[in-house]
Amino acid sequence: MKISYKRRCIQVTAAVLYNCNFKGFADGHIYRGDSKGVCVPGLNCYSCPGAVGACPLGSLQGGLLSAGNRIPYYVLGTILLFGLMLGRFICGFLCPFGLVQDLLSKIPVKKIKKNKVTRVLSYLKYAILAVFVIFIPLAFKYPGFCKLICPAGTLEGGIPLLIKNESLRSMIGFLFSWKCGVLVIILVMCTFCHRAFCRFLCPLGALYSLFNPISVYGIRVDESKCIGCGKCVRECKMDVKKVCDRECIQCGKCVEGCPKQAIKYGLHK
């Protein structure tokens, strides 16, 4: 079985497990059970009617808002654990919005290929992490990323809730219109540029990228078999400079394409 097929199955399974409160989609109510206190690994909106867990970014911003001068150890520890265990494997396999982007990439339009500009833009997500996820919540007591940018929140939470709750539609204002505009722009970007949100904008990917080279599980290169042909980097659609660097989402395309089978998934030694 090809890795690409296995990956798609895992992506769909993860999205369903994160959002298995199917009753919520029917009645338009947010699940508020005990599991909502637990973060899932990928970007998945807390306000999605089907969500049974919390989003790491939403939880981090909430922790910074409510902690005052204290550090939100639980949330930071959870993100640290996910990062150390899997790195950006989470982006490639366990993120529902990553699945959305992969499906948009299937639309047959001319794609923007990676280049020097896309590599520079890949640093933007670190700025978004610093400003919208950390600085704005601390300085202004406002969840900047969730309120102003997050496309998953609009797609998974805002739109489904409005569809099922007529009373909420009268409350639509500039902020929701802004978020819808951001969502549309990001979806269009992802149609013409592979995983544009992951590459340029996602602060959760920025966090996990810091752990990518040292994660317990992930893609590894057997240097004794590698012939340095560079096919892995050339054919990768992300802005990688080498296998499993900070931009690698460990999708497995390089594993399937390596002529010497020098690349594989495994535990870090």
Image (spheres, rainbow, N blue to C red):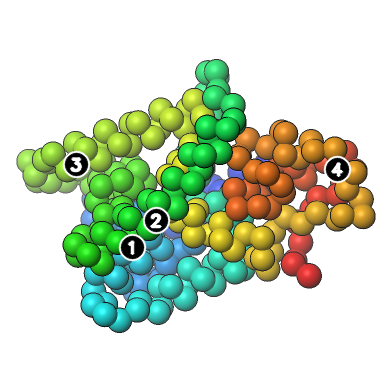
The residue under label 3 is which amino acid type? Phe
Residue 174: x and y, percent?
13, 39
Of residues 53 and 164, which is closer to you in this image? Answer: 53
Q: Residue at x 86, y 55 (%)?
A: 222
Residue 16: x and y, percent?
47, 52
Of residues 155 and 222, which is closer to you in this image? Answer: 222
Mark closer to the chain start, 3 or 2: 2
Residue 57: x and y, percent?
38, 60
The residue wearing badge 2 is 129
Element type where label 4 sits in the image: loop
The residue under label 2 is which amino acid type? Leu
Q: Residue at x 35, y 79 (%)?
A: 71
* Label 2 packing within 10 angstroms: few (<14), some (14-19), many (20+): many
The residue wearing badge 3 is 176
Q: Is residue 14 above or below residue 260?
A: below
Q: Residue 134 carries which label?
A: 1
Mark closer to the chain start, 1 or 4: 1
